[in-house]
Amino acid sequence: MSATHARMDARAWGVLLVLAGAIFLEGIDVAMLNVALPAIRADLGLSTGTLSGVVSAYVLGYAGFMLLGGRAADLLGHRRMFLLWLGVFLLFSGLGGLATEGWMLLAARFVTGVSAAFMTPAGLALVTGNFPEGPQRTRALGVYAGTAAGGFSLGLVAGGLLASIGWRWVFFAPVVLSAVILVAALLLLKDAGTPERAAGGFDLAGAFSITGAMLLLAYGVVRLEDTGEGTVGTLGVLAAGAALLGVFVLVERRAANPLVRLGILRSGPLVRANLGALLFLGSFAGFQFLATLYLQELRGWSALQTGVAMLVIGVDTVLAPTLTPRLVNRFGNVPVLLAGLVAAGAGYALFLGLDLDWTYAAMLPTMVLLGLAFSLAYGPLTMAATEGVAESEQGLAGGLLYTSFQFGTALGLSAVTAVSVAALGDATAPEARLEALRSALAVPVAAAVAAAVITAFGLRRRARGRRLPEAGPATGEVHVAAEGVR
């Protein structure tokens, strides 16, 4: 592609900023709430279970409806679904800020999660649909991914500041941002094409079965965090979710117009990208949770101090849209992604040396490496998960990716919580709690290493594919096959 085609005009930048603003909104909303939880508990008198449920309700709504949201965007129109559910996000974020009882907050967060499940894949599909594949899309996805990750890291600081004024502002601030984005979206966004129309109607059986399966699986994962929920009950929920997932597969195989074309899962690069996304986000979610416990409970830092300490990770907001696209164009997507995963694993490993009197200078290398990891990995994961996917299935590809992100986050939190609780036992001394945190930190390290191994396998497949044309005379056919495995 020529430099002319790679350059984006003012309107293209406006479209990108609107879509990036929406994913930034989703990230900052989650991060700000996490920091404000103690203030919410103190004001509303919530139990620990209800307080945990405020976070879990969002995860249930998000993960439970994500695949349905992605396919609905393809069938009903990316722009239409984006605008509709951005409006719902705005409304229920505001209702959350007006909550006076725990159940009101739980309901608002669940619907906010559902709205994000429909809005996010539609937004990603609009990015890939409005920017042609090549340098322009690489740059657009770099900006998009950078603002997504930056929203979470900057949200930690913003949440601390807003919570110090009043926790309700953690909900009201996204309302203002949503309103600005919605007005700009109405003026700038256009669908790249006409959505496909299913001649046999909407696949209701597939929609109900996959949504039920995702809800049950997400709920089962959330239950793993609390040993008091009961192992038998949790296993029963997970088994029911798996059974319903099996029903969904049977329905899709027989459906004339399936909600999810199962053949998309035969793509090696797509599967590797989703596994990498699950492990990468899971490792960071687990680390962030443990680091917060260490800084606030063992070191006595405030929520704002904790947010500022992790602000270095937000360097991806600058590097992802500037450095990463250049590296991808120069070296390719997979090598850059692998470098990011290796940086993440190294950062988590360095934090294993934490002590009760650690200075911030000792923590800083981990924060810098994680900022670099997000810069190099988040965008390429998004690119890998959507590359080569037909326009009519971009919403589905986005739904799969963000489902992986959500389940990875939930699994990461559950895994570190389970290991930490088991390692601590009945001990209460600071030294014992520190040792329990060290044990749990092995989970993020292992997850990052696993993600790197999976990605390295894809890099080896790509290198082998490039060598195939030299193997025999049928160069043309082999070249086509080699391109397919990338």
Image (cartoon, rainbow, N blue to C red):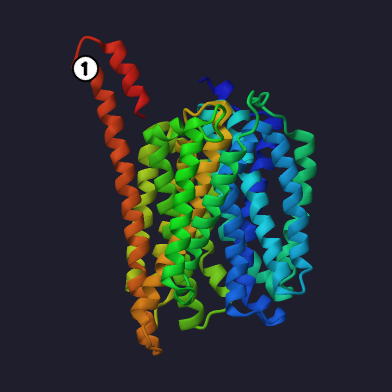
Residue 355 in view: no
The residue drawn where x is 36% and y is 83% is: 425
Q: Is residue 34 left or right of residue 451?
A: right
Image quadrant in which you'd find residue 103: bottom right
Q: Which residue in the structure is indicated by mark 1?
A: 470
Query: 425 left or right of 66?
Result: left
Where does the image place residue 248, in percent across and percent down from the top left?
50, 42
**Which structural element holds mark 1?**
helix
The one nearer the camera, 136 or 178, is 178
Q: Residue at x 65, y 38 (%)?
A: 16
Q: Residue at x 27, y 30 (%)?
A: 463
Number of residue marks: 1
Mark 1 surroundings within 10 Å by alpha-carbon count, few (fewer than 14), some (14 through 19), many (20 or more): few
**Residue lying at 62% horizontally and 43% vertically, measured from the top left:** 69
Place of residue 107 in the rendered image (x, y in percent of width and height, measured from the top left): 70, 63
Query: Residue 234 or 49: which is nearer the viewer?
Result: 234
296 shown above or below 277? below
Residue 233 in view, yes or no = yes
The three-letter code of the residue at mark 1 reads Glu
Percent position of residue 177, x then y: 74, 53
User: Where residue 453 sits in the image (x, y, percent)?
Assistant: 29, 47
Identify which residue, 481 or 308, lies in the foreground.
481
User: Above or below — where is 427 with respect to 374?
Assistant: below
Q: Quadrant of the C terminus?
A: top left
